[in-house]
Image: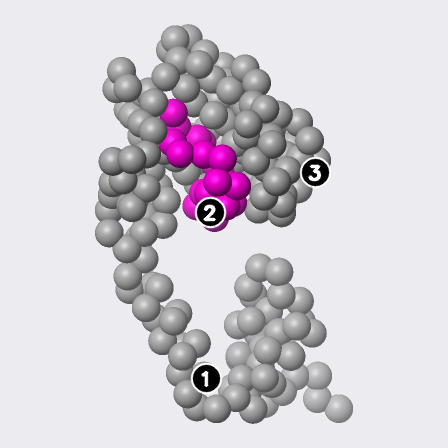
Amino acid sequence: MALAYDGAIQRLIDAFSALPGIGPKGAQRIAFHMLSASDEEASQLVDAITEVKAKVRFCDVCGNVCESSPCPICADPRRDRSVICVVEEAKDVMSVERTREYRGLYHVLGGAINPMANVGPADLNIPKLLDRLKSAEVQEVILALDPNIEGEATTTYMSRLLGPLGIRVTRLASGLPVGSDLEYADEITLGRALAGRRDA
Ligand SMILES: [Zn+2]
């Protein structure tokens, strides 16, 4: 019995398997779904992927995803420019936005310090943050990193780095599920952690 499908269907299964959060069985299920989907449904998926690769970029100021830089948050005059919320990934911006507790700006580091994966401070978008902090407008930096070992290491590093700058540096209150990602915290819990932030 063959252990792999022939040609195109196996290539599609392999492509889905390579995506984060999709195991071999899930990949097979999606591939067979696409096989029975209408041509229109299949084209919509292809077009959405093509469009995202063509249009979406990262904001030159904060590193958030956007279609034109600066992103709508950086460009919004109603946002509070005295506070910058530092997050690991662009998807975390949306997690914080969904709490409706925050009206300041963001800075996306593009990861967290992780010696096991050879990710150090030099690999993160830190120089641009330091540049932004030269503006006298910024009075507080909130470190909203993932509640896991890498996020903790990054919070410690960042608070030591920013401490001497004379800007208030805070971190999320405890209460988030430990060992997980910011994106898995529900809006109420994350909103509370943000509102109850403490000095780092
Ligand atoms: Zn931006």
Picture layout, residue 191 above or below residue 172: below
Q: Between residues 196 and 172, which one lies in front from this camera angle?
A: 196
Which secondary structure lies at badge 1? helix
Residue at 56 percent across and 71 percent down: it is: 16
Q: Are there few (<14), some (14-19), or many (20+) residues within 10 Å of tag 2?
A: few
Residue at 36 percent across and 50 percent down: it is: 65
Residue at 40 percent across and 34 percent down: it is: 103
**Residue 171 point in image, percent of width and height:** 55, 23
Circle number at residue 177: 3
Circle number at residue 94: 2
Q: Is residue 92 magenta?
A: yes
In magenta, the rendered stretch is 83-104
Dividing the picture into quadrants, the one containing residue 164 is top left
Considering the image in quadrants, where does the C terminus appear? Answer: top right
Is 26 on the left-hand or right-hand side of 170? right
Q: Which residue is mark 1?
A: 41
Q: Between residues 57 and 119, which one lies in front from this camera angle?
A: 57
Report how far apart the C-alphas of labels 2 and 3 lie in the structure. Answer: 18 Å
Q: Is residue 114 visible?
A: no
Amino acid of disc 1: Glu
Query: Which of the two discs, 2 and 1, labels the residue nearer the N terminus?
Result: 1
| Callout 1: CB less than 8 Å from ligand 1 | no
| Callout 3: CB less than 8 Å from ligand 1 | no
